[in-house]
Image: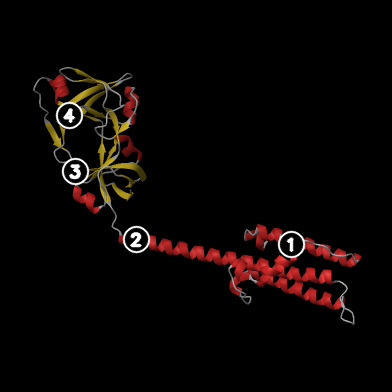
């Protein structure tokens, strides 16, 4: 039971092998037949003796007196060893005549090697215990070192911004949708300097549906870009393609409808890669550069760790993590939620 609880299945098998050897010894003695055996524990008589005499060489431990620190399994193996030596001495007396000649040296040798086998098993257990103890101590040291590092390293926190569906328009497309020489009207400034939500909205029309009152963001850009969620893609019937801002190759298009006209966009509809805006000073402090990809854990009622978060660095940016509406809803993002950078 002790060995089973300790998970010593191999040791149990070795002891069963020794038990079988002992039964054969008794049969040979009772029938007065020569006792023949070749190996025990997979070792020849010579190998058993060699290993029992040099535990440092084979098990990495020295000969040491039995100690309670070695545990109950080692103690029981030593007790079996002592008993086998005791039987060996009795057998030597029983089979040695008055002239000092022994009639059953085969049995005596087997009993001697039997005690060696018990000692070898004890050494194997001790060696394993020593190694496990060293490994555990090493793990504890590493864990403490990691904890110390975490204590010393400041936590890198970033505010979370939720980006709902919106569109950036080129000057040409703005005029096609709202009229010649049209300029956007600022509704409110956004968190990133120079960026604003306009009062103007458009409709997005796809093969399967449409989205009304999609906010236009300013200022105008070189190329028109539609940023929507995966859920929006399903509603419109367009393929969701994740892209960094400005990377339009291989992206789908759709129809944009404004009060003064329509635009057939052939590409530029993206599900924006999750990303963090950083000012160069913040990037230097956090040892990050433009284009890096990191992991960020978001603190919320449903915490989520986001992988492959793009780092975008510009002197026009301020520190903020941007997630789309699907990602924010999945994590139950709140106004006070923050992201914690976990590593590059």
Q: Residue at x 28, y 22 (%)?
A: 253
Q: Name the one closer to the observer, 92 or 261.
A: 92
Q: Earlier in the sequence, mark 1 or mark 4?
A: 1
What residue would you read off at disc 3? 314
For the residues labelled 1 and 2, the Cα–Cα distance comes to 51 Å
Q: Residues within 10 Å of mark 3 (few under 14, many from 20)?
A: some
Q: Earlier in the sequence, mark 4 or mark 3?
A: 4
Residue 149, labelled with which disc?
2
Is residue 297 depicted above or below 99 in this figure?
Answer: above
Q: Is residue 119 visible?
A: no
What residue would you read off at disc 4? 222
The percent coordinates of residue 44 (x first, y second) are: 73, 63
For the residues labelled 4 and 3, the Cα–Cα distance comes to 18 Å
Q: Residue at x 19, y 48 (%)?
A: 280
Outermost residue to the left: 181
For the residues labelled 1 and 4, the Cα–Cα distance comes to 83 Å
Q: Residue at x 42, y 61 (%)?
A: 143
What residue would you read off at disc 1? 40
Q: How is the image coloured?
A: secondary structure
For the residues labelled 4 and 2, the Cα–Cα distance comes to 46 Å
Q: Name the one closer to the observer, 120 or 251.
A: 120
The percent coordinates of residue 87 (x first, y second) are: 79, 74
Q: Name the one closer to the observer, 278 or 227.
A: 278
Q: Residues within 10 Å of mark 1 (few under 14, many from 20)?
A: some
**In the rendered structure, are the residues bearing label 3 and label 2 in contact, judged by CB atoms less than 8 Å apart?**
no
């Amino acid at each position: 039971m002790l060995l089973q609880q300790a998970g010593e299945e191999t040791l149990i098998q070795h002891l069963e092998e020794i038990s079988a050897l002992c039964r054969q010894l008794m049969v040979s003695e009772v029938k007065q037949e020569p006792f023949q055996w070749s190996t025990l524990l997979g070792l020849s008589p010579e190998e058993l003796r060699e290993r029992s005499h040099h535990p440092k060489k084979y098990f990495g431990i020295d000969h040491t007196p039995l100690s309670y620190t070695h545990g109950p399994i080692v103690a029981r193996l030593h007790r079996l060893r002592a008993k086998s030596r005791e039987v060996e001495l009795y057998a030597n007396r029983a089979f040695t005549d008055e002239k000092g000649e022994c009639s059953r040296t085969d049995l005596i040798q087997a009993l001697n090697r039997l005690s060696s086998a018990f000692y070898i098993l004890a050494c194997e257990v001790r060696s394993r215990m020593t190694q496990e103890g060293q490994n555990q101590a090493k793990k504890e040291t590493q864990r403490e070192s990691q904890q110390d590092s975490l204590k010393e390293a400041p936590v890198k926190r970033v505010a979370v911004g939720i980006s709902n569906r919106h569109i950036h328009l080129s000057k040409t497309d703005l005029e096609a949708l709202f009229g010649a020489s049209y300029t956007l009207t600022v509704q409110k400034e956004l968190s990133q300097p120079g960026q604003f939500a306009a009062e103007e909205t458009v409709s997005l029309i796809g093969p399967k549906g449409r989205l009304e009152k999609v906010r236009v963001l300013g200022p105008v850009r070189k190329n028109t870009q539609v940023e929507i969620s995966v859920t929006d893609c399903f509603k419109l019937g367009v393929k969701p393609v994740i892209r960094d801002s400005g990377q339009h190759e291989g992206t789908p298009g759709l129809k944009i409808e404004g009060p003064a006209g329509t635009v057939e966009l052939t590409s530029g509809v993206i599900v924006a890669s999750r990303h963090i805006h950083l000012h160069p000073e913040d990037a230097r402090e956090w040892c990050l550069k433009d284009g890096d990809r990191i992991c960020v854990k978001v603190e919320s009622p449903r915490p989520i760790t986001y992988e492959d978060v793009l780092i975008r660095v510009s002197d026009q940016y301020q520190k903020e993590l941007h997630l789309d509406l699907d990602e924010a809803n999945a994590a139950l993002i709140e106004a006070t939620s923050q992201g914690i950078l976990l590593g590059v």
